Amino acid sequence: MTATQIHLWTVEEYHRMIDAGILTPEDKVELLEGKIIEMSPQRPPHAGTTQRSSDYLKVRFRGIAHVRMQLPITLSNSEPEPDIAVVRIDPNAYGENHPNQNDIFLLIEISHTTLNIDREEKAPIYARANIPEYWILDIINRCVYIFRNPTESGYQEEIILIVDAVIAPLAFPEIEIPFSELFLP
């Protein structure tokens, strides 16, 4: 008896499926480690927190980094669409390619119903891609998971902070972010 074989897609094959119309925006999918995964639908608390966080961060990072909301990033065998990506400013506005691991300062996922996926599936992917810092805003428990020090086996540091905490991103130690500004009241 043989085991069932799963075909893992490359980023290039994934792009060809999009270009050919096999995958469309209505499909609501992302590529994670070669697998095409359906994205969770957004409930109002998730959408509202994502918008509030993005708006706040755009003001704080104006002129020093670009804040992208729910847009793709390209990693070696993944093309996720994190809720927020703080990336290098590209003079072409990433019109020729999505940001890659060398462009990314910070990724943020907003978790309303996806905490296990964000912690157990996405965190290892981001760590293997050497993303220096990854935050999960846990809407239900009103806390933030901070992941730092990426390695091939995962992030070596995980801190959980309450909504009243303030932290500076690694790439921008001069900018303090009060988490209360990111969550809905």
Image: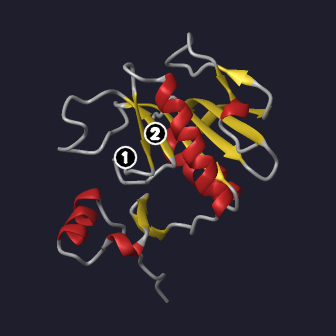
Which residue is tagged 1? 73
Q: Secondary structure at mark 1?
A: loop
Q: Compared with residue 14, is residue 21 higher up or lower down, i.e. above or below?
A: below
Task: Give how far across and how far down residue 138 sits, in percent.
Answer: 72, 47
> Does residue 123 show up?
no
How far apart are labels 1 and 2 at the CA level? Answer: 8 Å
For this orientation, the residue located farthest to the bottom is 1
Residue ID at (51%, 66%)? 39
Q: Quadrant of residue 145?
A: top right
Amino acid marked by disc 2 = Ala
Identify the mark nearer the N-term, 1 or 2.
1
Q: Give the residue type at disc 1.
A: Ile
Image point (69%, 55%), residue name: 115
The residue at which mark 2 appears reads as 85
Q: Is residue 138 left or right of residue 118?
A: right
Tell me the crowding category of disc 2: few under 14, some 14 to 19, or many 20 or more residues within 10 angstroms, Cα based: many
Given contact means CB atoms under 8 Å apart, are the residues at marks 1 and 2 in contact?
A: yes
Residue at 49% over, 89% down = 1
